[in-house]
Amino acid sequence: MGKLTKFIAILALPLLVNCKYIGSYKKDSVKYDTCDLSQSLLNEIHSYEETANTIINTIVNGKYKGGTYKELAKFVDKFGARLSGTQNLENSIDYMLELMRANNLDNVHGEEVYIPHWIRNEEHAELLEPRSAKLPVLGLGSSVSTPAEGIEAEAIVVTSFDQLKLENVSQAVKGKIVVYNEEWTGYGGTVQYRSRGASEASKLGAVASLVKSVTPFSMSTLHTGEQDYEDGVVPIPTASITKEDANMLQRMQDRGDTIKLKLVLNYTQYPDSKSRNSVGEIIGSSLPEKVVLVSGHIDSWDVGVGAMDDGGGAFISWYSLAILKALGLRAKRTLRAVLWTAEEPGLVGWAGYNATHFHELDNFTFVMESDEGTFTPLGIEYAAGVKGGCIIKEILKFLAPINASQAQYSTGGVGSDISAWTQSLIPGGSLLNANEKYFWFHHSPADTMDVLDPDDLDKATAVWAVVSYIIADLSEEFPRERDQINIEALNKLQTDPQVKLVHNKQ
Ligand SMILES: *[C@@H]1O[C@H](CO)[C@@H](O)[C@H](O)[C@H]1NC(C)=O
Ligand SMILES: *[C@@H]1O[C@H](CO)[C@@H](O)[C@H](O)[C@H]1NC(C)=O
Ligand SMILES: *[C@@H]1O[C@H](CO)[C@@H](O)[C@H](O)[C@H]1NC(C)=O
Ligand SMILES: *[C@@H]1O[C@H](CO)[C@@H](O)[C@H](O)[C@H]1NC(C)=O
Ligand SMILES: *[C@@H]1O[C@H](CO)[C@@H](O)[C@H](O)[C@H]1NC(C)=O
Ligand SMILES: [Zn+2]
C-alpha cells in the first residue's frame, strides 16, 4: 500500500462511516467520499441483495464450499510449476480450457501469443574466501550463463545503487561480482535491485551480480523473478542469494575481509514459443459487446508451484464464472474470464491480448485481476472515479457477512497485467486481501498450497463473483470518468482538519 493510499484509507474511515466520529469537524466540512448516487441507481443496486446472498451462500456455505481450494490443489498437484515457454504450461492451459468447456462457458478458446522460453539447467555458488562454504543460489529470469568452468572473482557488497555509484566504489567494481544487499522497503522499491541490478553492475565492468532475495522475511528462502538487461549493456550472469547470506557477506566486508566467490550458472534462452491466453465467457443477454473481465495469470516461476502467484487469482476468476453459469445467472453484459499467459517474464500474454483487442477496449466496462494473493479477502481495491467508487462501495455492502466490504481507492492502476489499462483507460478492481505475508512466499519454493486457506479462497471467489456479476448486469454503464482526488488538498488536511477536500473532474 502506498503512503498516500494508506493515508486515504486511514482518513476516510472515520469520515465516511459516521459523522459522530468526526468530532470537531463541521458536518459538511469534508466532502471527500460522500456518495450521492441517484435513488433509482441505489434502488437498482439494492435489488441484487437476494442474488448476492445466494451467490455468497452457495460458495461459502453451500455446494461450492471448499471448491476453489480443492480444484486449485488438484491443478497444482497435477502440473506443478508452469514456467513461461514450457510444454507443461501449455498442458495446464489445455486443462483449464477443458474445464471451462465442461462448465459450459461460452466462447471458450485460447488466443495465441508468443512468449519467452528461458530455463534453468544448473547453478551453484561457493564462498572461497574468507572461508569455504556452499551458498544456495537461484538465477533470475533471462540471465545469461557463466562460462562452463564458472567465474571466480572477488565480491563487492553494496546496499544501494547510490552506494554503487560512489566514486571509490564504482572504480573498484571492474572484474568483480557485485552483491546487492539492499534493504526491503516494500516490493516496488526493492525489486529494482533484482530487475536492474545486473545492468547497473555491468555498466561498471562487473562480471556477475547477486541480489539479496526480494522479501521482507526469510528462512533461508531464495526468491527468483525476471530481470532485464538494458539495451547496450554487456549481459552478465545474475542470481539471487538468501537474505541471510547477503547479510553475512556484508558483515565480512565491513570487517575488512576479502570475499572471493565462485559461480557456476547455466541457463538456456530458447526462441519465443507459442502459448495462449485462455478465455471463457458468459455472453451478455442484452449488451453482449460490453465486457466485464475477470482475470489472473496461469504461468508461474519454476520454483514452488505457483499456488499463490497466481493460481489463486486465476482460479477465483475461472471458478466465479463457472458458478455463476451453474446458478443460471446471465448478466446483461458479457462476463469474460481471462487466464493470462506469461505474466512473469513481463506481462507478455497481456501485451499480445492488448494488441489484438485494442479496438474493442472502448467496450470494456470494468476489468478485474487478482495477483497480490488470495488471503483473507477484505474487499476491492479500485481504480475508478468518485461515482464508480460509490457504486463499488454500495455493491460491497453485500459482502458484509464475510467481512469483505472495504473499497480502497488506488491512485494508480490495479492488478499486474491490467495495470496499464486501469492506470489510464478503463475502470477496474483487484482483490483487497490481508496479504501482508505475500512476499514471504512470492517467487520462492515456498509458494505452495500450504500458503492458501480453503475458506479464504471461497470468500475471494464470492467477492469476485458478486462484484463482477452486478457491474455486468446494472442497467447503467459503469462510469469511465476518472476523477482525481485533489492530492494537494488531501496533503493539507494532514495539518488543517478544516480544509475542504474536493474532487477535480478531469
Ligand atoms: C550448460 O549445460 C548444458 C548441459 O546441461 C551444456 O550442454 C552446456 O554446454 C552448458 N553451457 C555452459 C555455458 O556451461
Ligand atoms: C568509499 O568511501 C566512503 C566514504 O566516502 C567509505 O565510507 C567507504 O568505505 C568507501 N568504500 C570503499 C569500497 O572503499
Ligand atoms: C496496447 O495496444 C495498443 C494498440 O496496439 C498500443 O498502442 C498500446 O501502446 C498498448 N499498450 C501497452 C501498454 O503496451
Ligand atoms: C461496442 O459496442 C457497440 C454496441 O454496444 C457496438 O456497436 C460497437 O461495434 C462495439 N465496438 C467495438 C469496437 O467492438
Ligand atoms: C467477521 O468479523 C467478525 C469480527 O472480527 C468475526 O467475529 C466474524 O467471524 C467474521 N466473519 C467471517 C465470515 O469471517
Ligand atoms: Zn503474479
Image (cartoon, helix red, strand yellow):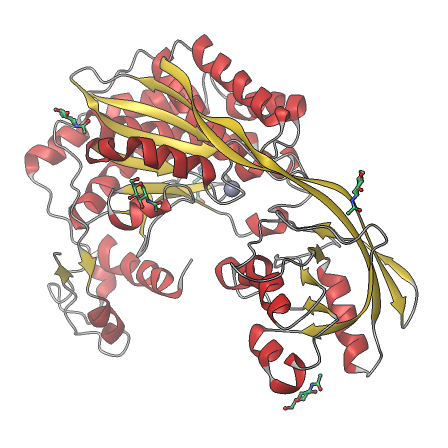
Location of residue 248 in the rendering, given as x and y in whole percent from the top left corner: 78, 69
Q: Is residue 80 above or below residue 308?
A: above
Location of residue 472 in the rendering, given as x and y in whole percent from the top left corner: 23, 27
Specify the quadrant of the image occupied by residue 173. bottom right
Is 477 placed left or right of 146 in the picture? Answer: left
Viewer-closest of 265 and 368: 265
Specify the quadrant of the image occupied by residue 31. bottom left
Question: Would you say residue 280 is visible in this rendering?
Answer: yes
Residue at 23% over, 18% down: 284
Residue at 16% over, 73% down: 499
Location of residue 132 in the rendering, given as x and y in whole percent from the top left corner: 92, 64
Question: Would you say residue 341 is visible in this rendering?
Answer: no
* Quarter holding ligand 5: top left
Instruction: Count all numbered tags in the image, as a single digit.
Output: 0
Is 88 placed left or right of 372 in the picture? Answer: right
Q: Is residue 467 above or below residue 78?
A: below
Location of residue 177 in the rendering, given as x and y in whole percent from the top left corner: 74, 67
Viewer-closest of 279 and 200: 200
